[in-house]
Amino acid sequence: MGGTVVESQGFTPGQQNQATTLPSSNNDALSLLLDQNQQLRSELQALRALIEEQGFEIRKLQRDSLSR
């Protein structure tokens, strides 16, 4: 009972479409995992920056509303 598992990939604006191929060896699989890990780390860093910006905006709005 063999089958192929196809994972969905998120879209980041500006990201180029990359064709996903099945790894032909353990080294290819490891390389793919390392690439995915780096991509996730980059995305996490961007999301943390967004959260920080939103927190700043919320605090600013709270201060502005208290001063009225």
Image (tube, grey):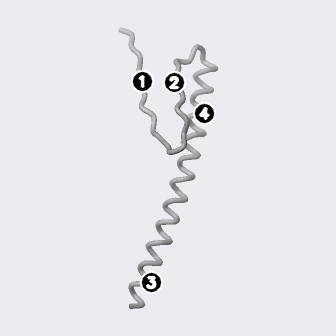
Q: Which of marks 3 and 1 is nearer the N terminus?
A: 1
**Image quadrant where one finds the N terminus:** top left
Identify which amino acid the numbered label 3 is placed on.
Arg
Kindly state the secondary structure of the residue where label 1 is placed: loop
Report how far apart the C-alphas of labels 2 and 3 lie in the structure: 48 Å
Q: Name the residue under label 1.
A: 6
Q: Which amino acid does label 4 sit on?
A: Asp
Mark 2 or 3, nearer chain start: 2
Distance CA(mark 4)–CA(mark 3):
43 Å
Determine whether 61 is above or below 42 in the image.
below
Distance (Cα) linking label 1 and label 2: 9 Å
Real-space CA distance between mark 3 and mark 1, rounded to the nearest whole angstrom: 48 Å
Q: Classify residue 32 as left or right of residue 63.
A: right
Seen at 44% across and 73% down, the residue is 58
Residue 65 locus on image (x, y percent): 39, 84
Q: How crowded is mark 4: few (under 14 residues within 10 Å), some or many (20 or more)?
A: few
What is the crowding at mark 1: few (fewer than 14 residues within 10 Å), some, or many (at least 20)? few
Mark 1 and mark 2 in contact? Answer it, CB < 8 Å.
yes
| Image quarter hosting the C terminus | bottom left
Residue underneath mark 3: 63
Q: Earlier in the sequence, mark 1 or mark 2?
A: 1
What residue is pinned by disc 2?
20
Going from N to C along the chain, the mark reached first, 2 or 4, is 2
> Callout 3: helix, strand or loop?
helix
Checking the image for residue 35, the label placed there is 4
